[in-house]
Image (cartoon, grey):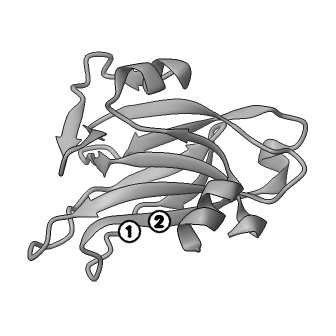
Amino acid sequence: ERARRLDAATVGFVQPGEMQPERDSNYQSEPADRAAGRTNGRGSRAGAGWFSFDLPVDANAPMAVIVTYFNEVGLPAPLGEFDILVDGTSVGHYEPNQSASGFYPAQYAVAADLVGGKSKVTVRFQAAAGSRIVPVCGVRMVRASGL
C-alpha cells in the first residue's frame, strides 16, 4: 500500500548514476567529471562539490523531495555534510540515520513559494567546504499530501 501511494504521489523521479535518466533530468555537476557510482546494485552519485537534477513539480500541491540513501548492514551510517536545495533555497541538511539499514528514504518539505507558477525546479546537492555528499541512490519529487 505504501509503495502504491508513493507511486501515485510521484511527480518526477531520477535514478542518479544512470545515463539516460540523468540526461532527461538535465544532470549538472561540479566537478564536471564526477564518476557515477554503484551502491548495492543501484546507480548513485556522491562526492565533493555539488550536483543537480531538474524535476517536474505540481504547482498546485504541497511538494516534498524524497532522497534515497543507503546504509550498509552492520556498519555505521556514512558521514557527509551537505544541503539539499530547491532552486537555490535549502530545504534540508543531511542527517545520518544510524538505525536504517539498506536503502532508506529521507523526506524534505518544499515550501509552496519555491514551486508556485513553475513546472519544474532544480534539486541540488551541495557539499559543505571540506566535506562530501554521501551516495544518493534516488531523487523523487512528490505531492506530500498523497503520502
* In this picture, residue 25 sits left or right of residue 36: right
Q: Is residue 31 above or below residue 1?
A: above
Q: In percent of the image, x 18 and y 51: which residue is there?
A: 40
Kind of residue indicated by mark 2: Ala
1 or 25, nearer to the observer: 1
2 or 110, nearer to the observer: 2
Q: Which residue is mark 1?
A: 95
Q: Position of residue 12 (x, y in %)?
A: 63, 41
Residue 83 visible? The answer is: yes
Q: Position of residue 25 (x, y in %)?
A: 55, 25
Q: Quadrant of the C terminus?
A: bottom right
14 or 4, nearer to the observer: 4
Question: Contact (CB < 8 A) between labels 2 and 1?
Answer: yes
Q: Position of residue 88 (x, y in %)?
A: 63, 38
Q: Is residue 93 above or below residue 17?
A: below
Kind of residue indicated by mark 1: Glu
* In this picture, residue 107 sits left or right of residue 87: left
- Which numbered mark, 2 or 1, is in the foreground of this view? 2
Q: Which residue is mark 2?
A: 106
Label 2 environment density (alpha carbons within 10 Å; few <14, some 14–19, many ≥20)? some
Label 1 environment density (alpha carbons within 10 Å; few <14, some 14–19, many ≥20)? some
Sequence-first disc among 2 and 1: 1
Q: In percent of the image, x 29 and y 40: which residue is there?
A: 44
